[in-house]
Image: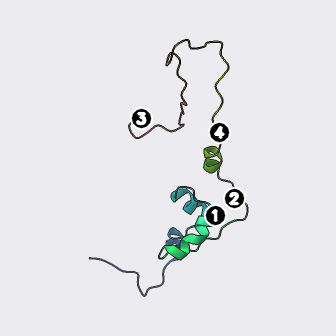
Amino acid sequence: MVQSLLGTKVDTRIKTIYMVDFETMHQRLAHPSNDVMRQAGKYVKDFPKVEIPTEHFCPGCAQGKMPNKAFPPTETRATEPFELIHSDLKSFPIDSYHKF
């Protein structure tokens, strides 16, 4: 048996389940810019109207824009091709699905 809430008075607690704020949308949509959030309503059907704050600080966006640290200076020099190889290694604070 399926019960429907259509035509009935909906409790305010149920309404809050469907409330969407800017922070939630920003995180769930992979951190889009404010311009993308403004334009999304034009191109996406039933996109919720979200109030975009004038001052918004997202730690994930800030961390993603940070440059990597430079390599420390060293006295070791390569004498042959490919004897010494430099590469960027990035560590992530969260383990992957398979714990790597």
Q: In the rendering, at what x and y percent does residue 58 appear?
A: 65, 53
Name the residue at 66% across, 47% down: 62
Q: Which mark is residue 34?
A: 1
Q: In the image, which disc is placed on residue 66?
A: none
The C terminus sits in image quarter: top left
Near-viewer residue (38 or 55): 38
Instruction: From the image, tell me which residue sits under label 2.
Output: 56
Q: Is residue 38 above or below residue 29?
A: below
Tell me what residue is drawn at x 73 percent, y 60 percent. 55
Q: Residue at x 41, y 84 (%)?
A: 6
Residue type highlighted by circle 2: His
Q: Earlier in the sequence, mark 2 or mark 1?
A: 1
Which mark, by number, is residue 99?
3
Q: Residue furthest front?
A: 80
Badge 4: few (under 14), some or many (20 or more) residues near its Cα, within 10 Å?
A: few
Q: Check if mark 2's residue and mark 1's residue have beta carbons within 8 Å.
A: yes
**In the rendered image, which residue does mark 4 sit on?**
67
* Alpha carbon separation for disc pair 1 and 3: 34 Å
